[in-house]
Image (cartoon, rainbow, N blue to C red):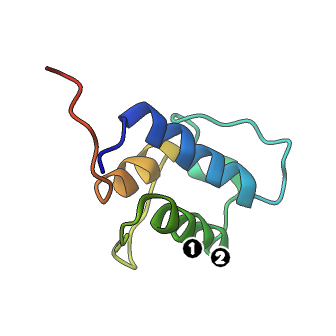
Amino acid sequence: MAYDRDACYAKILDFMRSEIQDKTIQFDMNTPIEGVKIDSIDVIHVIFKVEEEFGVTVDLPQESKFATVGEFVEAILKFIPIENTAS
C-alpha cells in the first residue's frame, strides 16, 4: 500500500510529539533536532511506531545524524512507499 507524502509527514511528526518529554515544545520540519529535545530512546520509539503503522522496516545507520526535524523525517520516509501524486 502506498501512502500520501503529506500524511506520512504528519504521522511521523505526531509520533515525535507523542514521544518527547516536554509536550509544550512546538516544532516543524525546520526546527533543529536539538530544539525538540528528543533522545535516542525516543527516536527508537518513533521508528517502532513508523514500522508498525506503515508495515515497513526502518534501518537507519547507527551513526546517522540529523540537523533538523525535516532531515530525520526525510530519512524515515525513504523506507515508506510514497504514492506518486505528480501525475
User: What's the amino acid at mark 2?
Assistant: Ile
**Residue under the image location 58 percent in, 38 percent down:** 31
Which of the pair 29/51 is nearer the observer?
51
State the residue position of label 2. 41
Which corner quadrant of the image does residue 5 belong to? top left
User: Which residue is at the front of the view, 7 or 33?
Assistant: 7
Relative image position of residue 6 (x, y in whole percent): 43, 31
Work out whether 79 lies above or below 6: below
Point out residue 49 in the picture as x, y percentages from the top left corner. 57, 65
Name the side, left or right, on which 83 lies relative to 52.
left
Q: Is residue 30 above or below residue 38?
A: above
Q: Inspect the image, locate mark 1, and give the three-letter code of the amino acid beneath it.
A: Ile
Q: Classify mark 1: helix, strand or loop.
A: helix
Quadrant of the rendered structure where residue 65 is?
Answer: bottom left
Q: Residue at x 36, y 67 (%)?
A: 56
Q: Give residue 44's mark.
A: 1
Most extreme residue toward the front is 1
Apparent side of residue 77 relative to residue 42 in the rendered image (left or right)? left
User: Residues at badges 1 and 2 in contact (C-beta under 8 Å)?
Assistant: yes
Return the residue nearer the eye: 18 or 1.
1
Q: Quadrant of the C terminus?
A: top left
